[in-house]
Image (tube, rainbow, N blue to C red):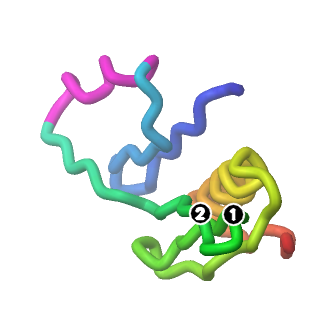
Amino acid sequence: MPASIFVRPDGTVEFLYEDGLRPLLELGPVTITRASHVEPTRDGRWTADLSPRGGPLLGPFTLRQEALDAERAWLEAHLHGRRPAPRR
């Protein structure tokens, strides 16, 4: 999956962390924050809690990967400044 790197008008760079992007952390002062929590439910399904970024609770999903995909779609749309398509 291609990296998602966003440069704000003030020069601030934001990206969804991936190990391959680690060299970017050497370019200047860095703040890493949690954007979400993908967790299992009591019945073995999965949710993506985006409240750390002011977002919704997505799911529940049958597969963890579905929750991870929904999480990434929401975060990328949020970083782009647009609303993501609703997902269930």
Q: Is residue 23 rendered magenta in the image?
A: yes
Look at the picture and state if 53 lies above or below 34. Answer: below
Look at the picture and state if 18 lies above or below 6. Answer: above
Identified by mark 1, the residue type is Gly
Instruction: Give the image quarter of residue 82.
Output: bottom right
Pointer 2 residue? 40
Q: For residue 35, which numbered disc appears in the image?
A: none
Left or right of 14? Residue 67 is: right
Q: For residue 44, which numbered disc appears in the image?
A: 1
Q: Nearer the viewer, residue 53 or 47?
A: 47
Q: Is residue 52 rendered magenta in the image?
A: no
Which secondary structure dominates the residues rendered in magenta? helix
Q: Which residues are magenta?
A: 20-28
Q: Secondary structure at mark 1?
A: loop
Identified by mark 2, the residue type is Pro
- Mark 1 is surrounded, within 10 Å at the Cα level, by few (under 14), some (14 to 19) or many (20 or more) other residues, namely few
Q: Position of residue 15 (x, y in %)?
A: 46, 43
* Image quadrant containing the N terminus: top right
* Image quadrant containing the C terminus: bottom right
Q: Secondary structure at mark 2?
A: strand
Q: Position of residue 77 (x, y in %)?
A: 68, 61
Left or right of 31? Residue 35 is: right
x 19%, y 42%: residue? 30
Look at the picture and state if 72 lies above or below 88. Answer: above
Q: Nearer the viewer, residue 35 or 9?
A: 35
- Mark 2 is surrounded, within 10 Å at the Cα level, by few (under 14), some (14 to 19) or many (20 or more) other residues, namely some
Instruction: Give the image quarter of residue 61.
Output: bottom right
Look at the picture and state if 30 lies above or below 51. Answer: above
Is the C-beta separation of discs 1 and 2 under 8 Å?
yes
x 47%, y 78%: residue? 51
Instruction: Give the image quarter of residue 65.
Output: top right
